[in-house]
Image (cartoon, rainbow, N blue to C red):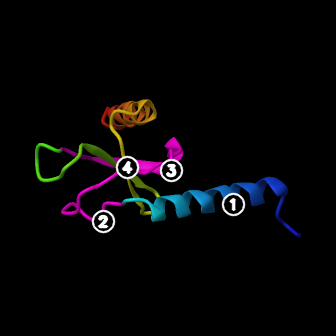
Amino acid sequence: MSGFSTKSLVLASLLGLLLLLLCSTSQAQSNQDCCLSYTKARLPRWAIKGYTEQLSSEVCDIDAIIFHTFSGLKACVNPKDGWVKKHLLFLSHKLKKMSM
């Protein structure tokens, strides 16, 4: 295999698997669509470029965070999960630094 190391192939395989998991789980397609369930995949922080908050007190049935990835996917996650809270805090700090 010329030009590809084992690490590169493993990384490409893992990214492909992540995309498959995200595509097969519930997704919010636009601002009018609601998340009906949460994805089981734990997204890496580097893949997330932003998020939208979905509130059950508005139109949709469940509270959710919709993470927007650099690859254009949208994943519905549980806002109560610890890893989600950490990712939101990281994004908040990143935004604060950008606005200074």
For discs 4 and 3, the disc positioned in front in the rendered view:
4
| Quadrant position of the N terminus in the picture | bottom right
Residue bearing the label numbered 4: 38
Marks 2 & 3, CB-CB < 8 Å contact: no
In primary-sequence order, the first of circles 4 and 3 is 4
The residue located at (52%, 59%) in the rendering is: 21
Amino acid identity at mark 3: Ala
Marks 2 & 1, CB-CB < 8 Å contact: no
Q: Disc 2 and disc 3: Cα gap in Å?
A: 18 Å
Q: Is the magenta stretch mostly helix, strand or loop?
A: loop
Q: Magenta span covers which residues?
A: 27-55
Residue bearing the label numbered 3: 47
Whether residue 20 is in magenta: the answer is: no
Q: Is mark 1 on a helix, strand or loop?
A: helix
Q: Is mark 4 on a helix, strand or loop?
A: loop
Q: Disc 4 and disc 1: Cα gap in Å?
A: 23 Å
In primary-sequence order, the first of circles 1 and 3 is 1
The residue located at (47%, 64%) in the rendering is: 24
Amino acid identity at mark 4: Tyr
The numbered disc on residue 29 is 2
In the rendered image, residue 3, in percent from the top left (x then y), is placed at 84, 66
The outermost residue toward the right is: 1
In primary-sequence order, the first of circles 2 and 1 is 1
Marks 2 & 4, CB-CB < 8 Å contact: no
For discs 4 and 1, the disc positioned in front in the rendered view:
4
Horizontally, residue 45 falls left or right of residue 16, namely left
Q: Decide: is 90 above or below 31.
A: above
Q: Disc 4 and disc 3: Cα gap in Å?
A: 18 Å
In primary-sequence order, the first of circles 2 and 4 is 2
The outermost residue toward the bottom is: 2
The numbered disc on residue 13 is 1
